[in-house]
Image (cartoon, rainbow, N blue to C red):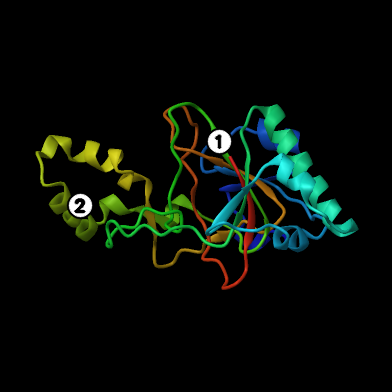
Amino acid sequence: MMIDLSLVNEQVHLVRNFKELVSTPFHGEMNAICWERELKGDFAELVNKVSLDGSMATLELEDLLELQLTEEGNLARDILMHDLELLKLHGASPVLNVIEYYERDDAYPFFPTDVYSFHVDRSPIPADTFLCTYYGAPSEILPNAQAQQKVLVPEIREKLRELYNGADDGFETFLTEHFFDLHYQAKPYARPISLGTGHIWRLAIDHPEMQSLPCVHRAPLEATGQKRLLMIC
């Protein structure tokens, strides 16, 4: 699934290889870099060979090597192993998941903080988020100008103040400690950008040293009965 170029704007930068993916600096509005690829291999076969104990499974290298696959399945496995090795050599810690669905957050019904909500990632150290959907519904990103931080929406902010029920000078700390400040809602005219399948993306995170705004993104709602194969770190 190739990138819809009509949706690509100043936010998204396309590169031709892994070296460009990891070395191109974020700046200004550009906070999402994509190594656009068209992959060969049967990723569906690989996914269907994985048994889930619950809603998702993490595939280790040993798990991949134990799978009995056809020639097309082997092509898919070789790509996965190569991608994982590239990221590990870069110093990242990639995780490969087969996902039926993520657990939903219902602690605060008016403010879900699960990955289905548009959000940004934060790290105490300078870092990036890498992800690739190899099979199933792809993740989405949202231009920052088309997103509004939920804690700034008056009616939501008022409910959060009621939930907090403390001194005013501790309210912002409360929002940060509970990760409320990381979540966004799409503006009425927003056009989310699908990240497609097979492409490796590098997304900017929330950190004081970043030269761009953090990238707003979310996990998709999975199609009934269809699993996802996702690499993330």
Up the image or down, 12 lies above or below 191; here it is above
Amino acid carrying label 2: it is Leu
Q: Is residue 71 left or right of residue 82?
A: right
Residue that appears at 43% across and 37% down = 122
State how far apart marks 1 and 2 are (Cα).
Answer: 29 Å
Name the quarter where the C terminus is drawn.
top right
Up the image or down, 94 lies above or below 152; here it is above
Dot 1 crowding, Cα within 10 Å, few <14, some 14–19, many 20+: many
Q: Is residue 186 left or right of residue 220?
A: left
Residue 181 x, y percent position in the rendering: 32, 45
Q: Secondary structure at mark 1?
A: strand
Residue 114 x, y percent position in the rendering: 41, 54
Residue that appears at 62% across and 32% down = 92
Using the rendered view, name the quadrant where residue 27 is placed: top right
Q: Work out whether residue 24 or residue 110 is closer to the camera in this orientation and state it.
A: 110
Residue 148 x, y percent position in the rendering: 36, 54
Residue 204 visible in rendering: yes
Name the quarter where the N terminus is drawn.
bottom right
Are the two marked residues, 1 and 2, in contact with CB atoms closer than 8 angstroms?
no
Find residue 128 and name its label.
1
Which residue corresponds to mark 2? 160
Residue 16 visible in rendering: no
Q: Work out whether residue 172 or residue 211 is closer to the camera in this orientation and state it.
A: 172
Find residue 64 and name its label.
none
Q: Is residue 74 left or right of residue 176?
A: right
